[in-house]
Image (cartoon, helix red, strand yellow):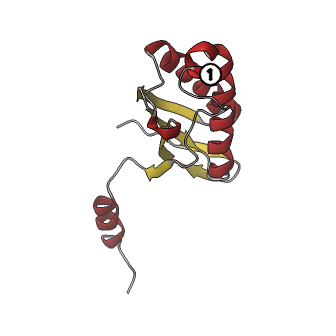
Amino acid sequence: MKNDFVSSGRSVSDMKAHLVLTTKYRRKAFTGEMLTRLHEILSDLCQKWNCKLIEFNGEEDHIHLLFQYYPQMDLAKFVNNIKSVSSRRVRSEFAEHVNSFYWEDVLWNESYFIASCGGVTVSVLRQYIESQNTPD
């Protein structure tokens, strides 16, 4: 079984998160070309933040990112950076299309969904911890 552990300083970790961003007012604003470009933009941003984009996909009104990150990363700042940079680039590169949906400089809904995820379920991890050979 392949491990996904990353090492940084004195820590070894395997932290992954699932992020969902929705368009403002859930407007069906994305085309396939825009999603392809968003994938490129977000992959580049992940590299700059020293994390790894594992999976990306989306539909007309939202996107999903699965990424691996280091424990010291500030997730709120990362998400805000992703939203601001991707919004600015998409709105400039696809201005005519985006302007048909929005009359202001927006793209993303203010809220987002993020959940931590790992290679095992909580119940498996709980069983592993409970089965430790505790000394008498």
Q: Closer to the camera, 43 or 35?
A: 35
| Secondary structure beneath label 1 | helix
Image quarter of residue 45: top right
Q: x, y (%) of residue 79?
A: 62, 43
Q: Is residue 87 left or right of residue 122?
A: right
Image quarter of residue 92: top right
Q: x, y (%) of residue 46?
A: 62, 32
Q: Can residue 50 be seen by looking at this rendering? A: no
On screen, residue 17 above or below 84 = below
Residue found at x 50% / y 16%: 36
On screen, residue 74 above or below 3 = below
Residue found at x 58% / y 50%: 12
Q: Closer to the camera, 78 or 63?
A: 63
Q: x, y (%) of residue 87?
A: 64, 30
Looking at the rendered structure, the kind of residue marked 1 is Val
Residue found at x 66% / y 32%: 104
Q: Is residue 108 left or right of residue 49?
A: left
On screen, residue 21 above or below 37 = below
Mark 1, residues whose alpha carbon is within 10 Å: few (<14), some, or many (≥20)?
A: some
Residue found at x 55% / y 15%: 97
Tell me the quarter of the image containing the C terminus.
bottom left
Tell me the quarter of the image containing the N terminus.
top left
Name the residue at the bottom extreme. Answer: 136
Q: Can residue 33 be seen by looking at this rendering? A: yes
Quickly name the residue at label 1.
Answer: 90
Q: x, y (%) of residue 126?
A: 33, 67
All told, the count of numbered labels is 1
Q: Closer to the camera, 79 or 15?
A: 79
